[in-house]
Amino acid sequence: MSTDDKNRAIAAAILPLVGGAENISSVAHCMTRLRLGLRDRSLVQDQALKALPSVMGVVEDDTYQIVLGPGTVARVTPELEALVAAAPKPAPSTAHGADELAAQGEALKAARKAKNATPFKLFLRRIANIFVPLIPALIGCGIIAGLNGLLINLGWLPSVTPALAAMASGFMALIAVFVGYNTAKEFGGTAILGGAVAAIIVFPGVAKIDAFGQTLSPGQGGVLGALGAAVLAVYVEKWCRRWVPEALDVLVTPTLTVLISGLVTIFGLMFVAGEISTAIGEFADWLLAHAGAGAGFLLGGLFLPLVMLGLHQALIPIHTTLIEQQGYTVLLPILAMAGAGQVGAAMAVYLKLPRNGSIRRTIKSALPAGFLGVGEPLIYGVSLPLGRPFVTACVGGAFGGGFVGLFSMLGDTVGSTAIGPSGWALFPLLDGSKGLGETIAIYAGGLIVGYLAGFTATYFWGFSKELLEEFNVDTETEPAEVTVASGGPTPPKTTEPEPVKV
């Protein structure tokens, strides 16, 4: 079977289990999840869906999210969209009470959405929607930058390295424009106007402008300045739409939007955002240099809970700012240790439950993805439903983070040139203050420490006597309320946003 046929088959298997094409109102995807808008949640066959070999898990948020993994989800999504588009549209129902039932379904859906739509969660979701689409370019350019650095250090292909440098740096030189574009789009404005205002930040000509008694530098304020400038542009544009006559709107609104937002950006936002960006970089460097082990321990240990609460999305602009300033983010390798603790904990669960074939089969199928930094199958299928192993997985992440942070205190800083990948998948993106060999060795050492600490903590303290009695059973159908056909306990319904891969 070809790759296209395989992805088409996955889409065809998913479609009837989510209620068919008529039950799907929207189809989208992120790094690992297929995100479906559903008209009637009750039509979804959760257990059968989880039993599909290609499905790693499901998460219910404002959309119904099916975890397929990186790469696969990007290929399955268009196949599912094609199937939905090709499906015949049902005739309007005239059955008695159909309208009332549909209204009840929409009301329930709206109530669930409103429950999860707290202002802070909506803000974080918007931040993610702005930056997550940039991750593929960050990854690609980051890997090319790493390859280019390796070739330069080895003295190989000197005629090629300038071209690679241009490929690696071009996107980062203009990332503010993309942030401005996505920001305006996300906040309900004209996307291209947000990009136009953000482009001012990276325009070389700003070096001729004096603001606050100093000459501006191209790129000053970076992604934070671009984000602020684009938000301002959206509000100016909306104000113009209300007050400018329709006959003049096409000329006046874009002109005033760029003019007003541009002036505020040049003579205010660039300076303020530049100071904030500099402070973020300096604080990160200071923290790891003076309290690296303790900071790494806390960050590595708390990252999984942050993911569960959706608070990890607040770190995305910080990662991007550090990459823009220093060429890499020093936080991601430490946070990635949470995934190592999760893998170690899963291994211990596998040994502690020798009679539970269901959970063991889940672990065996999910471990390869866990080593590559995709932790959702292990989190939602194993550790979180069991409870205590989730805590001991955090302990493993804490020790791994402390290990990497300790070396930062000793002057061996480890960073990542892009965000998104984790686990073993982060190796091609590593960079640091010392040689590549030392950087790789420290990161690998952190992973090993995380594996061992997560395993040890889970094996010796991850199970109470009652938990062992409940789950170390021969049958794969006990306890019925926590077992799924694909193997492994069914996680409680969660409302967390898209986690960074750990």
Image: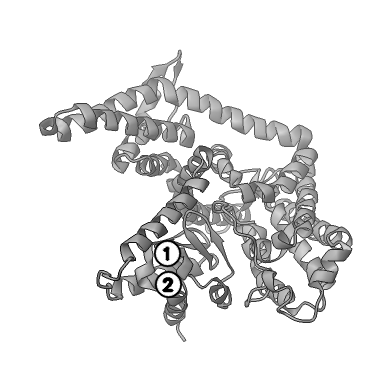
Question: Measured from the top left, where is residue 203 in percent x and y?
Answer: 36, 33
Q: Earlier in the sequence, mark 2 or mark 1?
A: 2
* Farthest-out residue, bottom: 1
Q: Check disc 1 and give the amino acid type.
A: Asp
Question: Measured from the top left, where is residue 293 in percent x and y?
Answer: 79, 41
* Above or below 381: residue 230: above
CB under 8 Å between callouts 2 and 1?
yes
Q: Residue at x 28, y 32 (%)?
A: 238
Residue at which label 1 appears: 40
Which quarter of the picture shows residue 475?
bottom right
Neighbour class for label 1 at 10 Å: few (<14), some, many (≥20)?
some
Q: Is residue 326 left or right of residue 136?
A: right
Residue at which label 2 appears: 19
Q: Check disc 2 and give the amino acid type.
A: Gly
What SS does tag 2 mark?
loop
Q: Is residue 329 left or right of residue 180?
A: right
* Farthest-out residue, top: 213
Q: Residue at x 70, y 59 (%)?
A: 384
Question: Measured from the top left, where is residue 471 in percent x and y?
Answer: 79, 71
Q: In this rendering, does residue 261 appear at all?
A: yes
Residue nearer the viewer, 272 or 308: 308
Residue nearer the viewer, 391 or 491: 491
Q: How many labels, in total?
A: 2
Q: In this rendering, does residue 169 appear at all?
A: no
Which quarter of the picture shows residue 264?
top left
